Amino acid sequence: MIKRRDLRTIWNSNGLFTGSGYATFMRDLLGRLSKDGWPIAHIAFWGLEGSSVYLKDYPDIKVYPKMNDAWGADGMVHHAKDFKADVVFSMQDVWPLNEEFLKQVKIFIPYCPIDKAPVPPGVLNKLRYANRIITFSRFGQKELEKKGFTSTLIVEGTDTNIFKPIDGMQAKKDLGLPQNVFLFVMVAANKENPPRKGFQEALEAFKMFNDKHPSSGILFQVQQPGPGGFPIKGFADHLGIGNKMIFTNDYTAIWGGGSQFINKLYNACDVLLHPSQTEGFGLTVIEAASAGIPAIVNNCTSMPEMVVDGKTGLICDADKPRWTNDNSYVYPANVKSLYSKMEETHTMVTNNRDGIAKACRDHIIKNYNIDTQVKEKWVPFLTSLQDELLTKPQTSATLNPPK
């Protein structure tokens, strides 16, 4: 039976050739959908300017550049028309999208993070232009339901053929890391202060941990701050643990490495630290678990969904929430609780490294394998959309969610 692949889609996000979390997932998803026969284009609102390109590894995906709007909203109108797209998808925060352009998009389906409770008004206002909504997490889906929005849940996934267990000692040797040090790792962007990724709480908790375990350290795949970022090195020096910090160089943190390099980082370490104050999903948590590495996450937003508490990681308590200028909460991790979970993971990994690694890997294979998700979630979703849009008259009543 010949598969019908007529639906033309264009996806606005970080350039799939760049190094962000969104780019990594776009690369995994769009590459697989294109190989399955779907006509796909991509708007790289971050990562490409001046000209459209085709990439060697994705020869059938036309990659359009950013136009004038910093978040790609104008491209969602004009590039979509050029590609003759039936549907415009986005994978990004929706609150900064220009509503004057959103009004002109024929069929708009955001695949969007919901990372706060309550959902900020700025997010809800832009979602009113969506014909359908796809959410990353059960948390996001439930928070939207509270505001009267229906969404489809398709969680992010990871390439388990790239993120996988390898020889940890050899990985440390390759990276020039000390062999007999218990290493935490943080893989994150450093863009704001207070730091959304929980750098301050992580360092304060690690200070307590290192006092009892001097042969320990933290490896950071994190760029040092530009304007507005958090001074990780400076704060570590202030706490007296600067000599326990290991950094990939800033150039590698921003530009280099790729997924294979990140997998080697995970395998060279023992535990991922991910105590974010807010998170729409937390891709590094499932990447690390796919490599057999447990994570410590904060008990807020989507993050508790990423781990099986006590088996593939631990969940620390959140501290008193802080109300932010978008009229919602963020949740700093409780430092004492975070320290306690660091002690627990140290015991877990020291006593049963192989068992923990197997539990982590099995959890991802079962729940977050990108190949399974494309086959069981994305292809059926696009097929249903194709049948609806290309065989029936299009009316706003058939697609618009409750307002």
Image: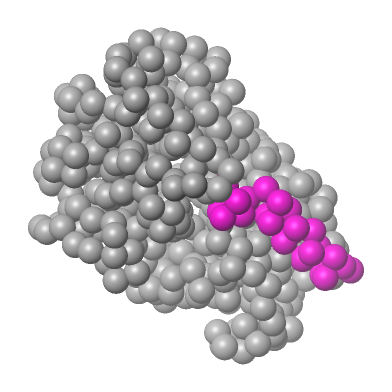
In the rendered view, would you say 209 is above or below 368?
below
Question: Where does residue 310 sit, x and y in percent of width and height?
Answer: 82, 50
Which residue lies most toward the front here? 1
Would residue 33 be found to the left or right of residue 314 on screen?
Answer: left
Residue lying at 31% horizontally and 14% vertically, measured from the top left: 396
Q: In which quarter of the view is residue 160 placed?
A: bottom right
Question: Where does residue 170 sit, x and y in percent of width and height?
Answer: 65, 87
Residue lying at 43% horizontally and 37% vertically, measured from the top left: 382
- State which region is magenta: 351-373
Question: Where does residue 163 sit, x and y in percent of width and height?
Answer: 59, 67
Residue lying at 72% horizontally and 61% vertically, measured from the top left: 361
Which residue lies most toward the right here? 351
Q: Main secondary structure of the magenta part?
A: helix
Q: In which quarter of the view is residue 59 placed?
A: bottom left
Q: Quadrant of the C terminus?
A: top left
Residue lying at 50% horizontally and 19% vertically, measured from the top left: 150
Q: Between residues 159 and 198, which one lies in front from this camera angle?
A: 159
In the rendered view, would you say 311 is above or below 377?
below
Q: Between residues 99 and 193, which one lies in front from this camera angle?
A: 99
Q: Is residue 324 visible?
A: no
Question: Where does residue 133 sit, x and y in percent of width and height?
Answer: 43, 27
Question: In the rendered structure, does residue 193 fall within the stretch colored magenta?
Answer: no
Question: In the rendered structure, does residue 353 fall within the stretch colored magenta?
Answer: yes
Total labels: the figure holds: 0
In the rendered view, would you say 360 is above or below 237?
above
Q: Is residue 53 visible?
A: yes
